[in-house]
Amino acid sequence: MNRTTVIAAAMCLACVEIAGTQSPSPAIGVPGALNATPSLAASARTVAAVWTATQAAMTNVYLATSSDGGVTFSPPRRVNDVDGDAGATTEQPPRVVISSTAGARAFTVVWSKRDTGPQQTRRDIVRMARSTDGGRTFSAARVAHDPKFSGARGWESLAVGRDGAVHAVWLDGRDAEKKIADMAHSGMPHKGQPPQDIYHAAITPDGRIVENLIATGVCFCCKTAVAVDARGTVYAAWRHIFPGSMRDIAFATSDDDGRHFGPFVRVSDDKWELNGCPEDGPALAVDRAGVIHIAWATVVQDREGQKALFYATSRDGKTFSPRARLPVADAATPGHPQLALAADGGVAIVWDELVAGLRRVSFTRVSRQGAFERPQLLSGDESASYPVIVPVDRGLLVAWTSRSSSAKSAAEPSMIRMKRIP
């Protein structure tokens, strides 16, 4: 199937109306491909959706845009200029933001590209490309960090800052072997995958990239989160390896547009001891009043090995409220929460959950007083996973990876489902 045929066929799927929560959820994607790992961004009535599509062992990043608040979407357009020059896992989706400089709207996309070499010499990279013509064309892909280091890197997140700048955060495995040796020498031997660092980069509208270290000793393969407030303060969250191999959520703040980050704090003393990676990173947002909202998954002790979802807030970035447990059904095993700020000042949270062997997507709201609404089920009979959410004109837009519940393998074709919530 050539690219023209793919786009023509996708138009029938992409340009559809997305109705309320009780209607069937339409889909976008490349027909016949494994469409997965969606991300969303919104600015006024403009919405951008990015995801990966894999066919014949070739993975590419695609973008579809909406000019009516997510009601209809354009046909998919490939972002990466070199065919197959992308990779993704469920915790490493491509990311997109919408920025504006001198009245011009730009789409910036970052994604990971995995290397297959040995850990000591591999050069996993984070790539980026930018469009300044509404997503019709993209610049040639470039590396979003210092390319000379070996090691695994990715698990990226993206946010828009002041003056059109874009802020990227990712996990970086440079010098991993030295870190393991140092930990053993200090009497705290490391278990499981090598620890990583978490890095930040400010990407200016003219393409300059300035990167800096946020913290070391980070959990190996949980996605990161980044947010920027109206003053230019940059916030980052990730899963950290605390003493005893406790995999809890950490948070740090930069007051100078990301050039320097202060000491990180522990969001909640969950004490999730694990000699491996949970593959379930945090979600983060900052509202107009400067209140920080964060959601994450951890294991609780009321049922051995049972995951639960929690939510907390902070007004100073130094102390967080006691964690509040999301109202998930008793029979469900939840994970992968994502959150967005709602127009009424509250917060909306989506997640996936495993119930009786079927993974599905659920949703709740958190009022300004911190009360949770009764969860709503958003997905239907299909297998639904890794949802994302953004505020749009007069509502919220949710996307997730959708696959037939009768699919016999993860390699079978899948699509990206969309649902508008009034």
Image (cartoon, rainbow, N blue to C red):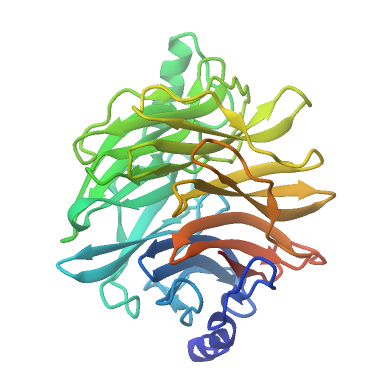
* Residue 320 vs residue 87, the one in the foreground: 320
Q: In the picture, residue 229 is in which quadrant?
A: top left
60 sits to left or right of 364: left
| Position of 266 relative to 224 (above/below) | above
| Position of 260 relative to 268 (above/below) | below
The residue drawn where x is 53% and y is 86% is 11
* Residue 337 vs residue 315, the one in the foreground: 315
The residue drawn where x is 36% and y is 28% is 317
Classify the position of the N terminus by image quarter: bottom right
146 sits to left or right of 284: left
252 sits to left or right of 23: left
| Position of 49 relative to 243 (above/below) | below
Point out residue 148 in the picture as x, y percentages from the top left corner.
Answer: 29, 46
Classify the position of the C terminus by image quarter: bottom right
Point out residue 362 in the picture as x, y percentages from the top left corner.
Answer: 67, 52
Point out residue 334 in the picture as x, y percentages from the top left corner.
Answer: 69, 42
> Residue placed farthest to the top in the image?
187
Q: Can residue 88 be seen in this view?
A: no
The residue drawn where x is 69% and y is 39% is 327
Q: Count the marks: how many?
A: 0
Q: Can residue 126 be seen in this view?
A: yes
Point out residue 311 in the picture as x, y percentages from the top left corner.
Answer: 55, 35
